[in-house]
Image: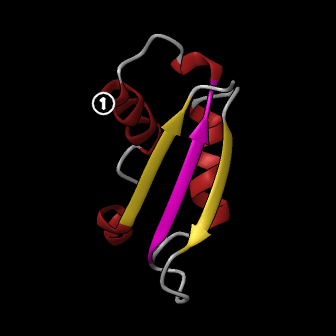
Amino acid sequence: MPMSGDEIAALIRAGIPDAEVEMTDLAGDNDHWAARVTSASFAGMPRVKQHQAVYATLGGRMGGVLHALQLTTAVPK
């Protein structure tokens, strides 16, 4: 069963404690999500490493929805 946006956001926040996470349901069916993750711990980290850090926090627990997650990461201004 796909995870909800709240469940995905909670996993990200648990793995990156200073993260602010905004979830958007892309398809209206709770199977396709966009996540915007903002974290001070990303400072100086290349974008690909930011994405790897977020996916690592998910630990493969997203099941079939992993391929449907669109991820944007940012350092707070």
Q: Quarter holding the C terminus?
A: top right
| Image: magenta residue range | 32-39
Magenta stretch: includes residue 50:
no
- Looking at the image, residue 75 sits to the left or right of residue 76; the answer is left
Residue 62 drawn at (x, y percent): 41, 60
Q: Which residue is mark 1?
A: 48
Residue in view at x 62 percent, y 27 percent:
39
Q: Quadrant of residue 12?
A: top right
Using the image as rendered, state which of residue 70 and residue 6 is in the foreground: 70
Q: Amino acid at mark 1?
A: Val
Magenta stretch: includes residue 37:
yes
**Residue 30, above or below 45:** below
Residue 67 drawn at (x, y percent): 29, 64
Residue 4 drawn at (x, y percent): 59, 71
Residue 68 drawn at (x, y percent): 35, 68
Work out which residue is located at the far bottom of the displayed protein and give it.
29
Residue in view at x 55 percent, y 88 percent:
28
SS state under label 1: helix
